[in-house]
Image (tube, rainbow, N blue to C red):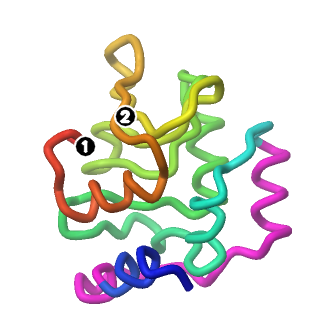
Amino acid sequence: MEDWIKEAIELWQEDEVKMNPPATAVDIEKAETTLNFNFPDDFKALYTVVNGFEDYEWQEYMFSFWSLDRIIEEFAKSSNKHVVGFCDFLIMSHVIGFKRNEPGVFKDYSVAPGEEFIAGTFKESISMINSGAPEIY
């Protein structure tokens, strides 16, 4: 397991966040097919260790990482089909996710037009979210 994944999981365990069991490669492939989107390798690395948080659990800074099933459900409900979300702040105040046509991680407020770039990689966004970096809000 990569150090950044181990550190993230240890932090979530300290926060007593309930996490889902790992996703399989088949689970990830199914989600990618359903969403018509390929997740980056660092996302897949984390999700093969933990498949998001249980239900609406959230970490210290009030971000909830979604399971693959919830990613699909939230995408289906979303009016913005340019973003594949994987996380939300304070029960959907805004979503953190990937844009279909642009590398990186973005935040989407749904009520304002456009998405705002926050990180070049998923791994970087995890670090920002877990440290409460101002750019994530």
Q: Is residue 70 above or below residue 136?
A: below
Secondary structure at badge 1 equals helix
Residue kind at label 1, given as amino acid type:
Ile
Disc 1 residue crowd, few under 14, some 14–19, many 20+, Cα 10 Å? many
Secondary structure at badge 2 equals strand
Q: Is residue 75 left or right of residue 5?
A: right
Q: Is residue 88 above or below residue 84?
A: below
The spot of residue 12 in percent (x, y) is 32, 79
Q: CA distance from mark 1 to mark 2?
A: 7 Å
Q: Is residue 73 left or right of residue 112?
A: right
Q: Provide the residue span drawn in magenta.
A: 11-34
The spot of residue 103 in percent (x, y) is 56, 33
Indicate yes or no whether the magenta region holds residue 16.
yes
Q: Residue at x 54, y 22 (%)?
A: 80
Q: Residue at x 29, y 48 (%)?
A: 89
Mark 1 or mark 2, earlier in chain: 2
Q: Residue at x 78, y 49 (%)?
A: 32
Q: Quadrant of the N terminus?
A: bottom right
The answer to whether the residue labelled 1 contacts the one labelled 2, judged by CB atoms less than 8 Å apart, is: yes
User: Residue 69: which quarter of the image?
Assistant: bottom right
Q: Nearer the viewer, residue 103 or 83?
A: 103
User: Residue 109: which quarter of the image?
Assistant: top left
Res. 136 mark: 1
The spot of residue 118 in percent (x, y) is 33, 37
Q: Is residue 134 left or right of residue 112?
A: left
Q: Quadrant of the C terminus?
A: top left
User: Residue 67: which quarter of the image?
Assistant: bottom right
Disc 2 residue crowd, few under 14, some 14–19, many 20+, Cα 10 Å? many
Res. 107 mark: 2
Q: Is residue 98 above or below residue 124?
A: above
Residue kind at label 2, given as amino acid type:
Lys
Q: Nearer the viewer, residue 70 or 4?
A: 4
